[in-house]
Amino acid sequence: MKLSIKSLIITGAVFKGLVFLLISFLNIIWRPYGGAYLAMMSSLYPYYDPAAVPASILLGTLYAVVSGAVAGAVFGWLYNFFAE
């Protein structure tokens, strides 16, 4: 059985974008929440700074959507490659 690459790209992008957005908003409400995760993301995403709110949240979410889409595409491609 093959997986749909398009579906995995959309799912990965939406999931990672929503998770990043949720953690960012929870970090604003409860300041220590997700701090280590956001600090790690700031080392991976150029120009993302967790202290600069709200423009930084939008930029980080955009990076998360793109990286989630890439991860979904790579996972789907690898699965289909080895499933044959």
Image: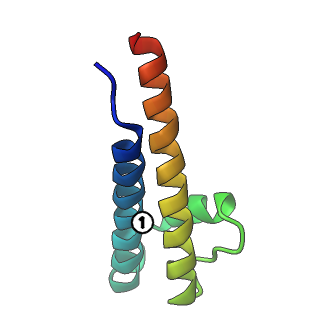
Q: Position of residue 83 (x, y in %)?
A: 39, 13
Q: Between residues 5 and 62, which one lies in front from this camera angle?
A: 5
Residue 53 in view of the camera: no
Q: Position of residue 74 (x, y in %)?
A: 52, 35
Q: Residue at x 42, y 22 (%)?
A: 80
In the picture as drawn, the residue positioned furthest to the left comes out as: 1
Q: Amino acid at mark 1?
A: Phe
Residue 29 in view of the camera: yes
Is 65 drawn above or below residue 32 in the view shown? above
Decide if residue 40 is on the left or right side of residue 30.
Answer: right
| Residue annotated with mark 1 | 20
Quarter occupied by residue 24: bottom left
Is 39 drawn above or below residue 67 in the view shown? below
Colour convention: rainbow
Q: Position of residue 41 (x, y in %)?
A: 58, 61
Q: Between residues 70 and 30, which one lies in front from this camera angle?
A: 70
Q: Secondary structure at mark 1?
A: helix
Q: Position of residue 39 (x, y in %)?
A: 58, 65
In the picture as drawn, the residue positioned furthest to the top comes out as: 84
Neighbours of disc 1 within 10 Å: few (<14), some (14-19), many (20+): many
Q: Residue at x 64, y 74 (%)?
A: 48
Q: Residue at x 57, y 82 (%)?
A: 56
Quarter occupied by residue 72: top left
Quarter occupied by residue 52: bottom right
Q: Residue at x 49, y 40 (%)?
A: 73
Q: Between residues 45 and 68, which one lies in front from this camera angle?
A: 68
- Which quadrant, please, contains the N terminus? top left
- Which quadrant, please, contains the C terminus? top left
Q: Between residues 11 and 54, which one lies in front from this camera angle?
A: 11
